[in-house]
Image (cartoon, rainbow, N blue to C red):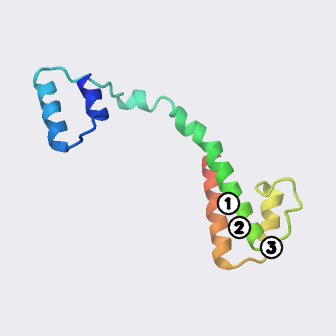
Amino acid sequence: MQVKAIAHARIKTDKIDAGVLAQLHASGFLPEVWIPDERTEGASPPRRAAQAGPAVSRAREDEVHGILQATSLPKCPHADLFNRRGRAWFERQVLPDDERAAIARHIREIDRVA
């Protein structure tokens, strides 16, 4: 309970927190934390990372569409800008180098997390 008290304390200083933690450690009251070994940690990917992939992809896709809209390019005639045909269409478009580089960076990130 004292460890929780440190987190919720109104007066927060490292000196006070360190003193409380030192007393708890000396008396053997600090809770232990289980840390998985390498084999256990590598057994399955973290759920949070797996859930983050689609969210990152959607965010990057929104950014790409925003850049394309800001450059006044026509809408991609294909169902999906990120499939093979959509990407081929994108490659044929005339864009400033910095915009093209930004879009390419986002597409690489989409491919990485997908």
- Residue under label 1, please give it: 63
State yes or no: discs 1 and 2 in contact (Cβ < 8 Å): yes
Q: Is residue 14 left or right of residue 59?
A: left
Q: What element carries label 2?
A: helix
Residue type pointed to by label 2: Ile
Which of the 4 image quarters holds residue 76?
A: bottom right
- Residue under label 2, please give it: 67
Residue at the spot x=61%, y=43% of the render? 53
Q: Which of 113 and 22 is in front in this view?
A: 22
Question: Of marks 3 and 1, which one's residue comes earlier in the chain?
Answer: 1
Residue at the spot x=67%, y=73% of the render? 99
- Residue under label 3, please give it: 72
Which of the 4 image quarters holds residue 73?
A: bottom right
State yes or no: discs 3 and 1 in contact (Cβ < 8 Å): no
Q: Where is residue 75 in the image (x, y as percent from the top left)?
A: 85, 64
Is disc 2 surrounded by few (<14), some (14 to 19) or many (20+) residues within 10 Å? some
Q: Nearer the viewer, residue 89 or 73?
A: 73
Q: Is mark 1 on a helix, strand or loop?
A: helix
The quadrant of the picture occupied by the N terminus is top left
Q: Is residue 48 left or right of residue 75?
A: left
Q: Residue 99, labelled with which disc? A: none
Among all residues in the image, which is located at the extreme front? 10
Q: Is residue 28 left or right of residue 88?
A: left
